[in-house]
Amino acid sequence: MAFLMVTTAIVVVYGIISGRYERALAIGAITPAGAAIVAGGESLPTFYAVALVGAALLALQWIARSGRPGSPRLGEIPGVSLLLALFGWSALVVLLAPLAFPGMQTVTEGRWNLVPGVLNSSNIAQLLYLGLGVVIIVILARSRTTAPSLLAIPLAAGVILSLWRYLSISAGVPFPEGAFANSPSFHYIEQAAGGVPRFRGIHSEPAGLAGTSIAAAAFGMSMAAHTRGGRRIAAIALAAGGIFLGIVSTSTTFLVAGAVLLALAGVVMVWRLVRLDLRVSSAGAVSALAVAAIAIVALPSLATLFTAEVDEKLESDSFDHRSTADARSFDLFTRTWGMGIGLGSVRASSLVFTLLGAVGVVGVILLVAAVLAIVLPSLRLRAHAPVVWALVAALTGKVIASPDLADSSGILWLSLGILAHGIVTARGAPLAAAAGRRRSVRGLARSARAALARARGDEPRGSRRRRTSVADI
């Protein structure tokens, strides 16, 4: 416990001193099952511990009015207004649901009944995490140094640490067990029904590892297509590591999400071919043909394997348990007339059913609108394509079998923040260029007037007080 507490404190200090707090947030997301603070049986994940300090820093800046000149206001950051509305609606539902539906039972592990005026610690924690998620987007969008490569920090480090633990289990390589996954808030799952061993990496369960692995694979493959040399090799290695960990996790989530992403990638490629917008080198064309040939040959075997895995999952006790939770969440959604009973009171198997039961129709609409407000404009930013793919992969995994909106992996909030920064920067570039051109024209005009005055032998008015400088031009 002390190890992650100390390292989190060091990361926070580094972020403050270096002025690159977005890196501190990315480093804090490396340990999704790690806790920086534990009190009274509740724990604060390392990612949100770093974000909490970031929220305090933002508050101090706002009070002192000392923000960086030129920083975008909240309303100028895409999606933030909608997310703030989601936070407000979620808080309102948490407060009103016990009054409107007293005695209604929650869909959580430790089921409890709603009592007017009583909030559970889970309600408070989920609202806090949602608020910190908005703070993370604001910090990344306002930072000068936010870049798409920032997401590689938690993805690559997470893959490396999980591979290290895999080597420890399979080959006896020394590994600090419990150092990176120490949160008492999680149940650590390493066995399936019947005692069959499963691999969770540094996550709390195989499904969590599968979600990060599919995001790492999507990010790495897209990054490899946009880089060259050593960076391309590193991106391919990241994708390969993510695919390997997804396979050894034996999670059906990885298989289904992978199939969805492959289908989506095919649609995007066909669309770009139709628009004649796809530029492929000779080596890339040969590689694509080779992959297509291998896929055609291996497709029957892969289809059989995929079908067998899905059928096995459908017949498992785990699927029955997850389906029951989804059904109960949807039942809450209908019984509350689409209002929900509050974040922290519902934890289904899928994020979709969790949101329906927790924040209802209004909350789902606000979240979808916020994500689209960030993702759609970022589709024009080629350099941010790897982040878009990682975000799509993470959301796909959540829709399939990850119920937490504010999960501690940080992929969702970091991706949205990086994309929001890209949009803000792209929108500000033409304005800055126009302002620069206006300053240049004014400077040239001032210089011309001064030259004309000197030619007449006159001293330009005010020239003793101010000379034309390079900044004017």
Image (spheres, grey):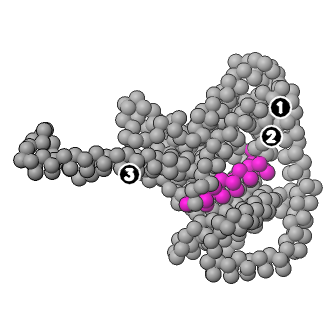
Tell me the crowding category of disc 3: few under 14, some 14 to 19, or many 20 or more residues within 10 angstroms, Cα based. few
Rendered position, 73 above or below 5: above
Q: Is residue 163 visible?
A: no
Of badges 1 and 3, the one in the foreground is 1
> Disc 1 and disc 2: Cα gap in Å?
9 Å
- Contact flag, marks 1 and 2 (Cβ < 8 Å): yes
Say what secondary structure mark 1 lies in.
helix
- Contact flag, marks 2 and 3 (Cβ < 8 Å): no
Kindly identify which residue carries mark 1. 333
Looking at the image, is mark 1 or mark 3 earlier in the sequence?
Answer: 3
Magenta run includes residue 146: no
Per the rendering, the mark at residue 18 is: 3
The structure residue drawn at horizontal position 57% and vertical position 56%, both measured from the top left corner, is: 381
Kindly identify which residue carries mark 2. 353
Residue 254 figure quarter: bottom right
- The residue lying furthest to the front in this view is 456
In this rendering, would 416 be left or right of 211? left
> Magenta residues, as a range?
383-403
Looking at the image, is mark 2 or mark 3 earlier in the sequence?
Answer: 3
Tell me the crowding category of disc 2: few under 14, some 14 to 19, or many 20 or more residues within 10 angstroms, Cα based. many
How many numbered marks appear?
3
